[in-house]
Image (tube, grey):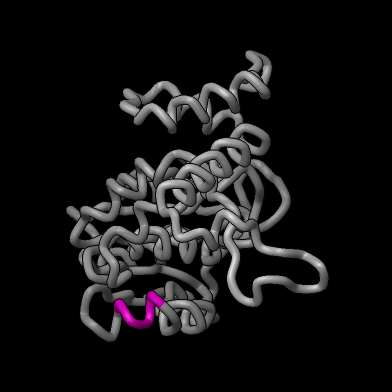
Amino acid sequence: MKIHILTLFPDMFSAVTGQSILGRAADSGLMEVCITNIRDHTKDKHKKTDDTPFGGGAGMILTPQPVFDALRSVNAQGKRKIYMSPRGRLLDQTLISELAKEEELVILCGHYEGVDQRILDAWAMEEISIGDYILTGGELASMVLIDTIARLIPGVLGNESAHLEESIYSGLLEYDQYTKPREYEGRAVPEVLFNGNHKLIRLWQWEGALRHTRRRRPDLLRAFLKRPLNLPKEEKQILENVLRQEPLLEEEE
């Protein structure tokens, strides 16, 4: 996959795209992240890329010219183009899986108070949000997007099934995890993890995931229960016990 990032702050990306999983993905040729500095494309002699909004209002707006030319420089026409915006479609696993199938993406990072709407309209930009809050710019949001997509590219994680076992991917939050030492400052690891009975361990993990999801994200559990579930007897019994002890209430939806 090739991802083009259009930004006013290209240096923000080096610490992320060159490290850890993303760095290995780039080194192995599985993913290429290309950074384009929007400021390099402005025709303003002072390298200005923003101006005050028509109609008044606080802040500055990214102007069309440098962004149009930056988009042309990466041949954005015909590619899937994304603008990171709090008013966009909320990023979820369905959207991530969809984006991960693309061969090439173009991501525009806004800054200041936003971008001129003509940029979004003329280039058919798809607006995506990572949550109901405001960031100072789209750079951090785009890093989140890139990281989530990278994990679904075959070969990036090494273990192809690893991402399927993680919290949100299964539809539930993750169960508790432990490592050495077995006891630390009076807190011991649950005994079930040492008995060698993989079935009991799996059932313990299943119950933990259910209880965490029920208490912290009942909306996720409600969506999970709407799936066509074909659970083994033991898993089904645990699910029924959890819901009997902590029923899902309508007002929690």
User: What residue is at 61 percent from the left and 76 percent from the top?
Assistant: 180
Vertical position of residue 49 compared to residue 135: above or below: below
Camera-side residue: 204 or 175?
204
Quarter of the image that includes the N terminus: bottom left
* Majority SS type along the magenta span: helix
Q: In x, y percent, where is residue 191? A: 62, 57
User: What residue is at 75 percent from the left and 73 percent from the top?
Assistant: 184
User: What residue is at 35 percent from the left and 29 percent from the top?
Assistant: 231
Left or right of 113? Residue 63 is left
Camera-side residue: 166 or 137?
166
Left or right of 87? Residue 171 is left
Magenta-tinted stretch: 21-25
Camera-side residue: 11 or 251?
251
Which image quadrant for residue 153?
bottom left
Quarter of the image that includes the C terminus: top right
Residue 6 on the magenta span = no
Which image quadrant for residue 145?
bottom left
